[in-house]
Amino acid sequence: MSAIVETLDLKKSYGKVEAVRGISLCVPDHSICAFLGKNAAGKSTTLRMLMGMIRPTSGIGRIFGLNIDNERDSVRIRERVAFVAEDKRLYDYMTVAQIIRFTQSFFPGWRDDPDAGGRRRREDLRRAS
């Protein structure tokens, strides 16, 4: 079985502060994995590294076999994976439908066809408008 997420001694430091101290993991394809830990344990930092949003200080990480510290690969990862950080801000002046339309403009591969859940999304948008 192939691994969908792999890390080897992945680390991230901010100056003298070690945010992630060498995580090694292997998440097999078709499985579920969760990060559990106290505040400031490095969960969000690890996810941001895996998404290619920040670079690791050292170590290796791959998602779908793509290298997280390679700029081109990290874009390809973010095209396939969604990540909503805890500090995600919403625009109070927008309706739910407006926020969805605004957000979808950042994703050229956004699909509205029924096979991608498009019919349900259109019904939800009509109700939210």
Image (cartoon, rainbow, N blue to C red):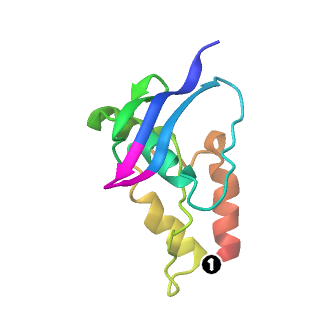
Measured as percent of width and height from the top left, residue 54 is found at 36, 49
Direction from residue 36 to residue 40 in the image, left or right: left
Direction from residue 109 to residue 71 in the image, left or right: left
Q: Is residue 7 above or below residue 113?
A: above
- Foreground pick, 49 / 57: 57
Residue, x 59% and y 15% (percent of image)? 2
Measured as percent of width and height from the top left, residue 83 is found at 53, 52
In the rendered picture of this protein, how many numbered marks are placed on residues? 1
Measured as percent of width and height from the top left, residue 102 is found at 44, 68
**Magenta stretch, overall SS:** strand
Residue, x 39% and y 30% (percent of image)? 59
Measured as percent of width and height from the top left, residue 51 is found at 44, 43
Q: Secondary structure at mark 1?
A: loop
Res. 91 visible in picture: yes
Residue, x 27% and y 38% (percent of image)? 71
Identify which amino acid the numbered label 1 is placed on: Ser
Direction from residue 39 to residue 127 in the image, left or right: right
Residue under pointer 1: 129
Quarter-wise, where is residue 60 in the image?
top left
Q: Is residue 14 above or below residue 61?
A: below
Quarter-wise, where is residue 29 in the image?
top right
Q: Is residue 45 above or below residue 6?
A: below
**Residue 47 is a magenta residue:** no
Residue, x 39% and y 57% (percent of image)? 106
Q: Which residues are magenta?
A: 12-18
